[in-house]
Amino acid sequence: MFTSFLIKYAEIGVKGKNRYLFENALVKQIKYALKKCDGDFQVRKTDGRIYVDAVSEFDQEETVEVLQKVFGISGICPVVSVEDEGFEKLGERVVKYLDEVYPDKHKTFKVAARRARKNYPLDSMEINMEMGGIILDAYPEMTVDVHEPDIMLHIEIRDKIYIYSEIIPGPGGMPVGTGGKAMLLLSGGIDSPVAGYMIAKRGVKIDAVYFHAPPYTSERAKEKVVDLARKVSQYTGPIYLHVINFTDIQMYIYDKCPHDELTIIMRRYMMRIAEHLAKESECLGLITGESIGQVASQTMHSLMVTNEVCELPVYRPLIGFDKMEIVDISEKIDTYETSILPYEDCCTIFVAKHPVTKPNLKIIKRHEQNLAEKIDELVQTALDTKELIII
Amino acid sequence: MEVYLDNSATTRCFDEAAQLMMKIMCEEYGNPSSMHHKGVEAEHYIRYARETLAKILKVNEKEILFTSGGTESDNIALIGTAMANHRTGRHLITTRIEHPAVLQTMRYLEDQGFRVTYLPVDGQGKIRLEDLEQAVCKDTILVSIMHTNNEIGTIEPIAEAGELIKRINPHTVFHVDAVQGFGKCRIYPSRMKIDLLSVSAHKIHGPKGIGFLYVNDKIKISPIIYGGGQQKGMRSGTENVPGIAGMARAAELMYENLDEDVERLYHLREMFLQGVSKIEYVKVNGCSGKEGAPHIVSLSVRGIRSEVLLHALEDRNIYVSAGSACASNKPMPSATLKAIGVEKEMLESTIRFSFSIFTTEEEIRYTLKALYDIIPMLRRYTRR
């Protein structure tokens, strides 16, 4: 029945002179996302709206599901579009529409007409009243409620006439690509994919870096991260995933530094490497899944010490979130099941029984001097031997 | 050099078996139930396979039931016996070290109201016949004991157990999971008083997705899969002709020079154990000598997590398994290792090497050298 979707976008509607940029980005993202669906579609921008028209057979459920992952969309309205063949015909079509969409008629409704084509013989108010009457005649069990109707029936008079009443919520946010690019430190855990999702939601394109430590972490742990990146990419579009072999650096720190500082020093080197990759690929910031106090390396003190090595801003969208709140989002974006697969990541393998929770920057820096001899060389090797996976 | 020492997980298919299957899939692809020539052609392969396998076990060819593998064979054996005999009794016996295909099926039967006794094992994984003797009673309809343990290679006293069970209760059905033992040992059901015997093809260089269950003609079992009535209604579904033919060919090849091959495997195992004994703090699990399977070695390496050792060996193209492959993708301590009393901190440090007839002395030497290099290195870096 439906052959079109009206795409609603809230926030980008108010962007002033830049509006067209946002709209174009949204059209581009929608087109890209629809490639995953069966069927051919046309995406058009008319009268300050975006329409997706199906020009072949298509699967409505699948299409809605895909559109629900395009940032920038606040609502998706399945629309029936008809030619203007006079008001009487329109009335018949509306009656039929209600029957198809609402088998149970015990509902309240309101007609919300909008006459964008001003030469239409009836004005908005007249359409509302006349159409209300037609509906009440056809379905006596329906009643009008102009304040909180069950069904808000939109009728828009343009070149064609559009009828819709359902608004399926979209993910909100802004179209990816309107906000620059950032490098996500992606582990196999629950938090980092969520962090990537949240920043991408603000229109930011995402690249990612994963640190693996063979033989301590397995090939399957890496596969798991690739799977997570793939899930996140459903929202963000293609992700460049940099895989860094961290084993030698980790071992060297193990040999040279106090054991309870291993994790914090490791984190500092991860940040350094991530920033190097970020600058190389023109990212404007780093993203981590850190949340205050979640583990020893995420206390305020530890965050200060790891933050200190970076010049680029580090975005930590989960910083004030509880674990359960993060889990909720990860379930929503379908990364949770993958995240909890039991493969060890390189942060946990050698973690001390009692790692420092209040590291002192001066002391950490002094102990990092123990690494002076070989660390630059090891970091360089890690960068030289990185693997790039395009997702 | 690539060294595949995970043959208890699965084996490389014999070329001859694979080629035969290719031919059947692409040329002689008929359905054995079809009336025409193509059907007859396919049926011949099945008949030949039945004859081959029956001959190896010295049983009647009517007693071979083709299944999708070890797990299905175990399921039919256990559920089929329980369902067909629940009026006679509701007591089942098994051991604590069975494969999950048996243990989980027993749990299911417990939910269905059957009572299950789980026999303990000694430090080497063997059941005690006294325990079995005490457990079997008038109400016992089934005893299920594995032939060879998949994690530590211990061979159970099957013939003695069979004798004992039948002496106490001649109506008790005796099932043996021989997935690891078939192709390494001579197993004769009638002599050992075995009524049901599970076998899987991919552990003997045959294809995956095929196996069989020997079913003593005299016992009563119910089918668990219904449909077109193939295999006398005991296991409906079009027969997997290429799989069946490939399995029979593999079994034939395994038993062609069995004594010689097994001798050689024991020699390799001895050589490997000798080499391993030079490494400090390594414990061998299971039985030594011929009480253990010729192809399985289980080691607990103190201070190293098995997964790490596995990946470090993998780095040198040596493929082994951490504990048992069927359980190792879950972080669940192995029931077998627990049952033989492996101490808690060694549970996660246990690794399994399993050989095949393709394994060479050179590969063993290469693996030992790798262990000599890797173990001290890995022990240097531990959680503190």
Image: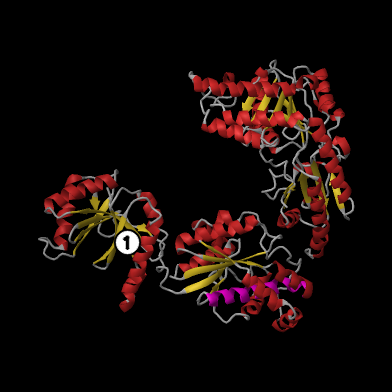
Going by the numbered disc 1, the residue's amino acid type is Ile
Q: Residue drawn 66% across and 77% down?
A: A301
Task: Reply above or below: B95 against A380.
Answer: above
| Location of residue B296 by image quarter | top right
Q: Magenta part mainly helix, strand or loop?
A: helix
Front residue of this view, candidates B152 and B210: B210
Residue A289: x percent and y percent? 57, 68
Pointer 1 residue: A7
| Location of residue A303 by image quarter | bottom right
| Location of residue A49 by image quarter | bottom left
Left or right of B375 on screen, residue A9: left
Residue B268: x percent and y percent? 83, 43
Instruction: Indicate yes or no whether the magenta region holds residue A267.
Output: yes
Q: Residue drawn 72% across and 69% down?
A: A248
User: Is residue B155 something that shows in the picture?
Assistant: no
Instruction: Indicate yes or no whether the magenta region holds residue A217.
Output: no
**Dot 1: what SS?**
strand
Q: Mark 1, chain letter?
A: A
Residue A326: x percent and y percent? 55, 62
Left or right of B126 on screen, residue B206: left
Task: Reply above or below: A355 against A165.
Answer: below
- Segment tinted magenta in the rendering: A257-280
Task: Reply above or below: A356 against B53.
Answer: below
Front residue of this view, candidates B104 and A234: A234
Residue A145: x percent and y percent? 25, 56
User: Is residue B1 something that shows in the picture?
Assistant: yes
Q: Locate the C terminus of chain B and report the quarter of the image it occupies.
A: bottom right
Q: Residues within 10 Å of mark 1 (few under 14, many from 20)?
A: many
Front residue of this view, candidates B290 and B228: B290
Front residue of this view, candidates A264 and B29: B29
